[in-house]
Image (spheres, rainbow, N blue to C red):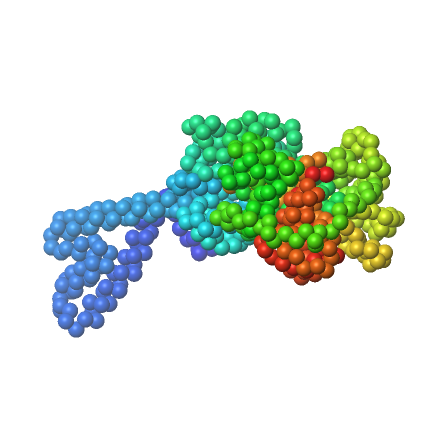
Amino acid sequence: MAPRRTPLGDRVRYWFDSTLTRGAPALVGWLALLCLAVVVPASAVLVWTDPDAPASLGSRLTQVWRLTGETLRLGGATGAPLRVALSVLLALVALLYVSTLVGLITTALTERLIALRRGRSTVLERGHAVVLGWSEQVFTVVGELVAAHANQRGATVAVLADRDKTAMEEELSTKVGPYGRTRVICRSGPPTDPAVLALTNPAEAGVVLVLPHDAPDADAQVVKTLLAIRAALPDPDTGPPVVAAVRDDHYRSAAALAAGPRGVVLESDTITAALIVQAARRPGISLVHRELLDFAGDEFYLTSEPALTGRPFGDALLAYTTSSVVGLMRGAVPLLSPPPQTPIGPDDLLVLISHDDDTVRLDDCAHLVDEAAWAPAQSPPARPERVLLLGWNRRAPLIVDQLRRCARPGSAIDVVAEDGEVTGRQVDDADTQAGAGLTLTLRRGDVTRPGTLGGLEIASYDSVIVLGRDPDPGSDPLRPGDEPDLRTLVTLLLLRRLERTTGRELPVVTELIDDRNRPLAPLGPGADVIISGKLIGLLMAQISQNRHLAAVFEELFSADGSGVRLRPASDYVRPDQETAYATVVAAARQRGECAIGYRDHADASTAPSHGIRLNPPKTERRRWSARDEVVVVRRD
């Protein structure tokens, strides 16, 4: 059989492709031939169609050469062959120089643009905030820092994470919104590398925040990042304040050592568990916490007041019109809601809530108090509590421990979890934590199935806590494919149906991982929803502005410390009587409490704040209804 002949066109293309593979000389040769094939015929047409062209063929060819030389910048000189050759040589040298110069400039600009795109240039700002890492907290932290710096010029936030710089900028711009006067700079690279960390100029930063994340080795990475900060600073002991968060208590000591004397290390899981328990025992309290931690409203400040030195702490409660005093900072120890007769020492700082530091002004309000409007003192009887815990995750044993520490005798907690979610050892550990005063019962079942919840006496529980599963190791909750809240949303739908069946509104406390799922949760607008990552981000942003507030928040959020409470307004003033808010503050003082605001239930379902009003002016007058509540700080 005769061999099949390759078509001529295929052989020509193959030969052409083979010449291109020989490198730059072949490319230059083909480019020259292509240019000559176009320029020479076009120049000839121009010469032959020119009415003033010379008559002789030689003169016309000379004119064609000149046009070709001018077009291709080859000199175009005529005359002796040596003269023509030298003209072409000089033109080629000039062309080579210009081409090389353009190539070098283009390459340098390209490399510079690539470096800028990768975020590899050093930040030169001073007093800026440095945010290390990328997690669900980054949007909350950056947004709160932008809000805190709204009245400052030249404020800067530098974010360093091992992600693409452009992608970070786009996500922050989309989810945080306008930055106002604050400049947000992103740098790309691992925060655990001291050489990369130096890009953020940590030595001259005002504060450094190390964000936690949900990877299996998250706490170890936080410790490593803190060590990298020490390595990047000339003198770690005099560097900027550092705020970090770890999940496991076992890593807190190591992280505190790595953070140094100016560092603050939070336990995110412990804080989240405490807030969940507080919301379960006092419905609506999460709304107050959100208002306290948000820079958009009133926040905590520490101030010295020499005019009050030596006077009882109770006098300070009515010494400010636009600020609410909640305690004393004595050294490094916070005394929240101390007895009213506690004397204010010369070195004590007042812990108060105000809209800004310039609104903290002395103004005696004692004359506004109407003692005749006070309600008679009464203490509601303590009774056992029943709590239903649906689902299980790594914070569940901490929640049980928090409940144990504040449980009344005879209280009980029922846990419903699917096989595989909770191990026998975890149940034993939690049961050991329960101890006296709290009975723990475990039931196996899938909380996303109607039959599981239908078999429970839902209406008999004082509160229901819904926990989601922990994110899978290595998953990214910021990506659409990773949805740790799906089961939680399904469980909430089933509880909503049970509410309609039983006719009772259940006091449900929900833990969500992704803040974007909050509008999807089938709950009332004033329901208690704990966005674990967002709350930790808010707390870190608050402490970054004043690290001494860390002790205040730790006392405020602990199960056995002084905390925020919502109490009926009828415990302080007579219902349907119009009085100034100063009267409520004075009535709370008589009970050893510090009033910091109220909740108007008439606006609870419509107002963006769900009726919560923190730090109202003590001159504000209103008619108090039996459904209103007073927000106080007190010690149980």
In the rendering, at what x and y percent does residue 27 appear? 35, 48
Residue 521 lies, in percent from the top left, at 71, 54
Q: Answer above or below: position of 181 versus 386.
A: below
Res 610 → quadrant: bottom right
Pick whichever, 369 or 86, lies toward us. 369
State which quarter of the image contains the C terminus: top right
Instruction: Place residue 602 in its image quadrant.
Output: bottom right
308 horizontally vs 285: left or right: left
Q: Residue at x 62, y 29 (%)?
A: 251
Q: Residue 527, position in %: x, y?
A: 71, 53
Query: Residue at (16%, 64%) from the top-left corner?
Result: 60
Q: Residue at x 45, y 51 (%)?
A: 151
Q: Splitting the image into 4 quarters, where does residue 198 fall?
A: top left
Q: Note whether residue 67 is visible.
A: yes
Q: Nearer the viewer, residue 258 or 333?
A: 333
Nearest the eye: 358 or 377: 377
Q: Nearer the viewer, residue 470 or 62?
A: 470
How many numbered dots are placed on residues in this image? 0
In screen coordinates, is 12 left or right of 209? left
Seen at 61% across and 29% down, the residue is: 252
Which residue occupies the extreme left position in the image? 80
Residue placed furthest toward the bottom: 51
Indicate whether 68 appears above or below 146.
below
Residue 572 vs 394, above or below: the answer is below
